[in-house]
Amino acid sequence: GQIAALTTKQVNALTTDQVVALGTNQVSAITTAGIQAMSTDQIAVLETRDLAVLKTTQIQALTTVQISTGLTTTQVQALTSSELAALTTTQIKSGLTTDQVVALGTNQVTAFTTAQVQAFTTDQIQALETRDLVVLTTGQIAALTTSQVNALTTDQIVALGTNQASAITTAGIQALGTDQLQAMETRDLAVLTTGQIAALTTKQVNALTTDQ
């Protein structure tokens, strides 16, 4: 009750030592306005155990600046699947840094909804480590926009599983550059649907190597 009663000014006035000293039940009691009033320095000292108990409303209250400048990569790694799934598309697009995306674990990337996946910038897509990319669900792969598909690095293309390759939309297939297409493994090409094959442009077909 006392923590929830703190004004935004009072929350912002807490020293970093005081923020560190807060218990998990106290952190989860901070109002959404109080969360937004926290400085990036205060956000940065929140212990991972405290971050883990944040409510959906508190997560969604975080400003893009608090996310990009306040949250450390270690803190990002401590976010639960439900907390990541609670992030707004704006928080993802304008908040998450490429370093934070790199820090995400395989169990975390699968937590993103298709709408969240579509919110990723091309830089963020390229920042996904191959070990994270390979665990994306077929639904997440199918959600990729043409710009996102076109942004995939050749290493990421090589890492795609057969079920993932066959999940790329026909528009996504057409968005593939010649370098990307040439990077596709024969096992991935073999599972492309008739619709995906038909979607290939003459330029793309001509770019296929003799091995492919």
Image (cartoon, helix red, strand yellow):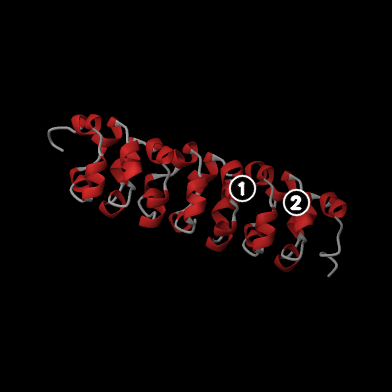
Residue 206 in the image: state x and y as whole percent: 19, 29
Q: Look at mark 2 in the image and give the residue it sits on.
A: 36
Asked if 42 appears above or below 127 in the picture, the reply is below
| 123 lies left or right of 137 | right
The number of numbered discs placed on residues in the rendered structure image is 2
Q: Residues within 10 Å of mark 1 (few under 14, many from 20)?
A: many
- Amino acid type of disc 2? Gln
Asked if 26 appears above or below 126 in the picture, the reply is below
Quadrant where the N terminus is found in the figure: bottom right
Residue 72 in the image: state x and y as whole percent: 61, 46
Extreme-left residue of the structure:
210
Residue 97 in the image: state x and y as whole percent: 56, 41
- Amino acid type of disc 1? Gln
* Residue 150 appears in view: yes
| 68 lies left or right of 148 | right
What residue do we see at 38% from left, 36% from top? 150
Q: Is 102 in front, or is 35?
A: 35
Q: Is 22 in front, or is 82?
A: 82
Q: Is 146 in front, or is 80?
A: 146
Q: First in sequence: mark 2 or mark 1? A: 2
What residue do we see at 57% from left, 49% from top? 89
What residue do we see at 73% from left, 62% from top? 27
| 164 lies left or right of 92 | left
Task: Using the numbered discs, state the Cα–Cα distance from disc 2 to disc 1 in whole angstroms.
Answer: 13 Å
Asked if 154 appears above or below 191 in the picture, the reply is above
Q: Look at mark 1 in the image and give the residue it sits on.
A: 91
* Residue 192 appears in view: no
The quadrant where residue 32 appears? bottom right
Asked if 84 appears above or below 99 in the picture, the reply is below
Q: Secondary structure at mark 1?
A: helix
Q: Secondary structure at mark 2?
A: helix
| 114 lies left or right of 170 | right
